[in-house]
Image (tube, helix red, strand yellow):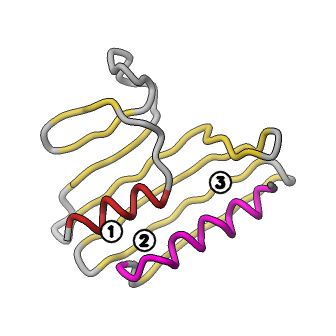
Amino acid sequence: MTIDEYFIKTERVISDFDIVIKQKIEKKSTGDDFGIFKGTLFFDFGKLDFIEVMRIVSESPIKIKYKYHFLNGNNEMIFRYDNVKHHPGISNFPHHKHTKEGIYPSNEPNFLTILTEIHKTQ
């Protein structure tokens, strides 16, 4: 897999969700093995700001850095997944999820996981 193939695959996942009414996506690649996928997905009920910094290693995509920040229609955070190394006490460090209630360990999500969770919030 190349980084451009990863971008195409991810855009297909996004297009499969009819809750996305508008999108602003930026893709930057350096060669076949490194890229940044970032932007905002808009819904009738909120928006998702995201960034993925990716490297392809042995044909597999590896997320170096990620953030998926979901806000409701009032710009209030519903959740944010990220792997910023600012919560070393989390059991699945550095992967974690922020909610209004607190910070929790999480697995590294992907767009299918994130958009499925957002779909369930409506």
Residue toward you, 60 or 37: 60
3 and 2 marks in contact (CB < 8 Å): no
Question: Is 68 covered by the magenta stretch?
Answer: no
- Residue sitting at 36 percent across and 19 percent down? 91
Tell me the kind of residue under disc 3.
Answer: Ile
Give residue 44's quadrant in the image: bottom left
Tell me the kind of residue under disc 2.
Answer: Leu
Tell me the kind of residue under disc 1.
Answer: Lys
Q: Main secondary structure of the magenta part?
A: helix
Q: Position of residue 4 (x, y in %)?
A: 77, 63
Q: Position of residue 2 (x, y in %)?
A: 81, 56
Q: Residues within 10 Å of mark 2 (few under 14, many from 20)?
A: many
Q: Which mark is residue 47?
A: 1
Q: Position of residue 95 (x, y in %)?
A: 43, 32
Q: Which residues are magenta?
A: 2-19
Give residue 48's quadrant in the image: bottom left
- Residue sitting at 82 percent across and 40 percent down? 58
> Along the polypeptide, which appears first: circle 1 or circle 3?
3
Residue toward you, 20 or 26: 20
> Along the polypeptide, which appears first: circle 2 or circle 1?
2
Mark 3 lies on residue:
36
> Along the polypeptide, which appears first: circle 3 or circle 2?
3
User: Mark 1 to mark 3: distance in Å?
Assistant: 19 Å
Mark 2 lies on residue:
41
Residue toward you, 8 or 22: 8
Q: Is residue 27 depicted above or below 110 in this figure?
A: below
- Residue sitting at 33 percent across and 30 percent down? 105
Q: For numbered disc 1, what is the local secondary structure?
A: strand
Residue at the left extreme of this rendering: 101
User: Mark 2 to mark 1: distance in Å?
Assistant: 6 Å
